[in-house]
Each structure stands twice: as C-alpha cells, then as structure tokens.
Image (cartoon, rainbow, N blue to C red):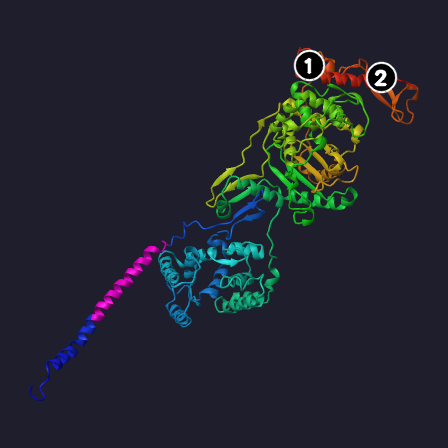
Amino acid sequence: MAAGKPSGADRGKRIFLRKLPKIISRVFFYFSGLMFLLLGAAAVYLFWITPKAELVHRQVAQTSIIYDRTGEHKLYEIHGEENRKVVTHEEIPDLMRLATIIAEDNSFYEHHGISLSAIIRSAAVNLRNSGLSQGASTITQQLARNAFLTREKSWERKIKEIVLALKIEARYGKDEILDFYLNEIPYGSNAYGIQAAAFIFFGKNAADLSLDEAALLASLPKATNTYSPYGNNKDLLITRQKMILENLKDKVANEDKKLVAEALAVDTLAKIIPLREKIEAPHLVFFVKDQLEKTYPREILEEGGLKIYTTLDYDMQKTAEATVKDYILANEKRYRAENGALVAINPQSGEILAMVGSRDYFDEKIDGEVNVAIQIRQPGSSFKPVVYAKAFEKGYQPETIMIDVETNFGPDGTGKDYIPNNYNLNFNGPLPMRNTLAMSLNIPAVKTLYLAGIDETIDLAERLGITSLTRRSAYGLSLALGGGDMTLLEETAAFSVFANDGKRNPATAIARIIDHTGQEIVNLAKKDEQVVDAQVARKINSILSDNSARAPVFGSQNAFFFKNRTIAGKTGTTQNFRDAWTVGYTPRIAVGVWVGNNDNQPMQAGADGSVVAGSLWHKFMEAIISRYPEEKFIEYEKVKSSKPMITGNFETKTIYFDEKKGKRVSEKKKGKDNVVEKKAPVNKHGILFYVNKDNPLGNYAPNPDDPMAIRWEEAIDKAYEKEDKKD
C-alpha cells in the first residue's frame, strides 16, 4: 500500500462522518414522528376515555330537605357524605364569585382551562420531590376533578384533569363554569356547594351572604380541614379571609371599597353556628324519615334532592313543644311524671299538625329521643268509646240502660275471677249508656264489651286505624278498660274518625314531595272512607261532648270544658298510674296527650288521666282553640223500639243508701252525711233478660242460658237484696 494513501476503513469512516448529519436528521425525524404519533394517540386515548364533560344534565348528589306545610321552615336535611343544594346563577352573590376567583384562580377569565406556567412550575417542584405535592389547579381543573374524577394523587389523574378542563372550557362559558364550581366544591363539614355551606356555617341562604361571610367561605376549599371554622386553626382561616378581602380592594369599584373595609372589621367567626345537627320538630321529622325509607331507596333520599313538604303546622308545633315541656317540668315532682307526648290531627284530612314525642328530644336523661307518641302503651279508659261504638253498631243506643252493680264476670284466664271496680269504688245502679260512658264507669264498660264482642270490637278498632291489637286470643273483657296496647297516634287518629262523621283519613305527616326537576311525585289526597256509620259516630260525639253527663264524676269544670265551645273527649289511666291519657276533639282538630315515664315507672298515686294529662291537654287547647270556629257536632237520630231497656224507658225508683254503712236506709235519712240517692230498677233484671245479645233491636228471644246473663242477674239480685235491708 502506497504511503499516505488512506485505507478502505478510513474512507468508510469519512463517508460515514459525512452522512452522519443526514442519518441523525432522519432518525430524529422518524423518532419525532413516532413520538408525535404516540403523543397524539395518547391524547386521543385520554380524550376518548375521559368523560364528555357534561355538566348541565349530570345528576349530582343533592340533599333532600324536609319542610313544614308552607315550605317556609326547613326542618331537616337528609344527605350522605355530600350535603348539597344546587342554586341558580341569580342566587349566588357576585361578591361570592369575586372572592372565590381571588382565593382560587386570579386569572380565571384569562386562561382556557389550564395555566401552562403554573403547570410547568408545579411539575418542576413535583419532580424534585419525586411525587405530586403541588397541584396548581385552576377553578376549571378543580371542577373537573370534583365532578368526574377521584382525589387520588397520580400523574394519570392529573393528565385526565387537564384534558377534562379543556373539554369543559370548550363547551361552557366562564360564568357557567363558575356556577358549576360553586355548586360542586366541598367546603368541609359535609357541605358541598355554596348553598349548603352558607346554611351549615351561617344558617342562611347563599343569596343572603354578607361580604365578610363570602370571603370566609371562599377561604375553605383550598384545605377544608386546615381552615375549618370548627377546627384548631381559626387564626389561619381569618388570615386567609383577610388576605382575600385585601386583594378584593383592587377589584371592586371605588364605591364598594368602603364595603370591603367594613367587612375587614367584622368578627365573622362570631357568626358561625355551633356544629350540631340542625333539626326542628325532631320527633315528627324522624317519623317522616321512617315513612320515606319504606318507599324510597336510601340513595334517592340522600342524593335525590327531594323537597318533602310535611303536614306540620309550624306555629302549632312550637306551641305544643313549649306547652309539653313547661307543664312537665312544672309538675314533675308533684306527679312523679318526667315525660309527656302530644299529637294533633286534622280529622277532615288526616294531616298531623303537631307531634311531640317527649318533653325534650335532646335530653338523654329521660331518653328524649324516644317518640312516645308512636310507642305502644296501655290507654286505660280512653279506649272505651271504641267499645261503645261497636255496641251502637249492633243496635244498642245511648239511651240503653246498663245496671252498674258489683259483678263477677267469671274466670279471666289467670285462675281468678274478674271482678272490676269503678274508679271511685261506688256503684250507680241503672243508668243510660250515655252516662256510663261519659262518667267512665268500668263495670258498664265491661258489660258493653261483652255485648259488642271482643273480636268485633277489635275489628272496629282496625277500621279506625288501630293496628297494634294483634294478640286477639290474649285479650279478655279487660280490653274494655284499656288492657290492649296501642299508640297515642293511633288512638288520636281513631277519635278523628268520630270527629269526621265516621269518615277516615289515615293519619299522615307527608303532604307532597317534589323531585329535583320540580315535578310533583306525591300529593296527599283526601280519602274520606266511611268506616263507621255516621249515626254511630254522632252518638259517640254526643256522649263525649255532654258536659253534664260527665260532671258527676269529673265535675263541670273538667278538662274538656270551654265556655261557648262544644268539645268531645275521653281520659284514661292505667293500673298503678303508669300512663295518663287524654284525647279530645272538635270537628276540626283532634288532640291526644300522654303523660308518664318512659321506663314505665308509676306516677304519684292519684295521677289519673283527667288530672295529669287532662290539664296538659286543656293548656294546649287554650292556646290554639281560637284558630277554629265555634262548631257543634251533628245530632244523631234516635231509634224507636218497643224494648224499654233499649230506649231508656225503664221503670226505676229512688232509694237512699248509706255509703259508709254499705246498706239502704229509709227516706227519712235523706240529706244525712254519707247518704246518697240512687236509682234502683223496679224489675230487678239487666239488659240480657230483655234482648238477644247480638241483635238487640230484632225479634230474636233472649238467651236465658247465657252464662254471662246468669252472672249479671245474680249480681243484680245480690246488690238489691243487700240494699233492701233498711235501718
């Protein structure tokens, strides 16, 4: 090889070096193209897999709200994690928007969904820290994340957030995006959206927020736990709030700068409502909630944005709550009764106007959360009108004569004979059913139940809406005296049927329900189902409103006496004074009251329904009776019958009885101490001697072999044989 002549290897090297730029250029071209394709494919993929950014028709979780009957009073909110109520553009103050932009995204109206400089800056910090510690999210990105993504910190989620933000900006205007954001973003304490936040923290609507309040709320989304007004960093919250207000000075017109200065001087934290579940009429609210849960899935109630309008009369409810609490606290030591309940119903619609389940829902010492109005308790004598109503259905009349004497009704299932006493331990001889019911005499009531039939009486109770008498085989004749358990709500609703001329409207607390679109999905319809003959209802009304008929036992100035008012009612007391009941009504309102102890401890001896519950009932009615017109019940039609015991044409004589000595005395001792006048039958026979038990108006013959008829006749013979022994 000649000296200095390049070898083949050298020539190849020089050729390669000459072509290298072209090779690099070509490789870079293909690599760039490949990367472009990959990035393009990734972008298309991300664009494809991210949601469509549909915000208008997207169903967001919205809080359901329970209102009073007018919708003016919010009673309770039903929600899950997200307590949210979406509001319109007009319901959000402009200063709230401005404060939010200052706090979260000063260049909101300049960018197109993302801020490239902020992204590059935060990416550099995150790379140095080997993680995702900084966000640099615009308002649009935050909206995208909250509306469509999870809160996990990952590069994939961040890229999706950017893509979605671009989609949102391409589809919606800035004002729309800001409205979506303010309705979507969490503010802490389960408040999602500005309306929920305004109500939870300040107890008002978003539209009514003052500037200082708006600035404080705008401070929260950045870090809801850190800046919570209920947390330990209130100084940080106020610092951030004042920073927002200071920055706001440069954004508002000169005439509004004074408004900002005033806001800076306000102690906003002093306005914060204590963190406690906000609820009014709690016993009724949870009664309603239980009813709703039987119809709607939990997700619908917690996220469906329903507006539930109850039947509650707000003013009446407040009166009821105050009356029950004040009365029980004032008389707790006197009667040894620490609790009370009250229910008010409109008989003409079945609407529950007021419900108080205890003297104080929030008093744990008395189990105040328990709603005694819907707990089964024994009603005592307050159940007697149902017994008499069944007897009237069979053909017995208010004028029908019952003989009130000590009576052995035979074995009661315990191995003992059932021999009830009247409350005052006296016996009154022959009296019309009108008087025996009005005076609440026990022995005639037990006789009336036998005439009416136990099963038949329970059937009537069920027609009236009493569903808790489920142990039919366990009830004996003591059912007449309240031996079967029921709720105050049930019995008050049953009396409402009498008040409404025998027509039943089931008791309800829900008037109507509106869904989140504004469509009415439930509306209370008046039923007026005739479950009791009108004449039967009128007979009960006539007796229970007859003040002169109940006066011999309860006095003329009893719980149901109101001057120039006709009011029907019945009281009841259970054994050992464990429960005191009073249920009274007019054609327009029925009110039931219970007094006692949740743990079933006896009250003070003598704390009977007419005294304890009756006084509470009267106080409540005094407060609300003027709302209603003076109104009388319709009179019943009297039945003609050839049977004197049925129509009251029963021959009696006056006798004189020394109650202390327990025997009859001569007329000469009339007016002496312990001597009372009584009526005695001329013919010493009771009702079963004259009529067939199950068809008293028919021509069927009495059954002289009826064991109960024999017992009643023996009791009458014994009573008047004793009385015939004169001094």
Q: CA distance from mark 2 to mark 1?
A: 26 Å
**Image-based side of 700 in relation to 714, left or right:** left
**Image-based side of 370 in relation to 219, left or right:** right
Residue at which label 2 appears: 721
**Image-based side of 118 in relation to 623, left or right:** left
**Label at residue 666:** none
Say if 368 sits above or below 693 in the image. Answer: below
Say if 699 sits above or below 61 in the image. Answer: above
Foreground residue among 55 and 106: 55
Q: Quadrant of the N terminus?
A: bottom left
Q: Quadrant of the C terminus?
A: top right
Disc 1 marks a residue whose amino acid type is Asn
Residues in magenta?
27-52
Quarter of the figure with residue 105: bottom left
Disc 2 marks a residue whose amino acid type is Glu
Mark 2 near mark 1, Cβ–Cβ under 8 Å?
Answer: no
Secondary structure type for disc 1: loop
- Give the label, 2 or 1, closer to the camera: 2
Residue 566 visible somewhere in the drawing = no
Identified at 47% across, 66% down, the residue is: 102
Q: Decide whether the magenta segment is chiefly helix, strand or loop.
A: helix
**Image-based side of 495 in relation to 124, left or right:** right
Q: How many marks?
A: 2
The image position of residue 115, as x and y in percent, is 39, 66
The image position of residue 715, as x and y in percent, is 79, 19
Quarter of the figure with residue 41: bottom left
Say if 505 sits above or below 275 in the image. Answer: above
Identified at 56% across, 41% down, the residue is: 290
**Label at residue 692:** 1
Foreground residue among 21 and 397: 21
Magenta includes 15? no
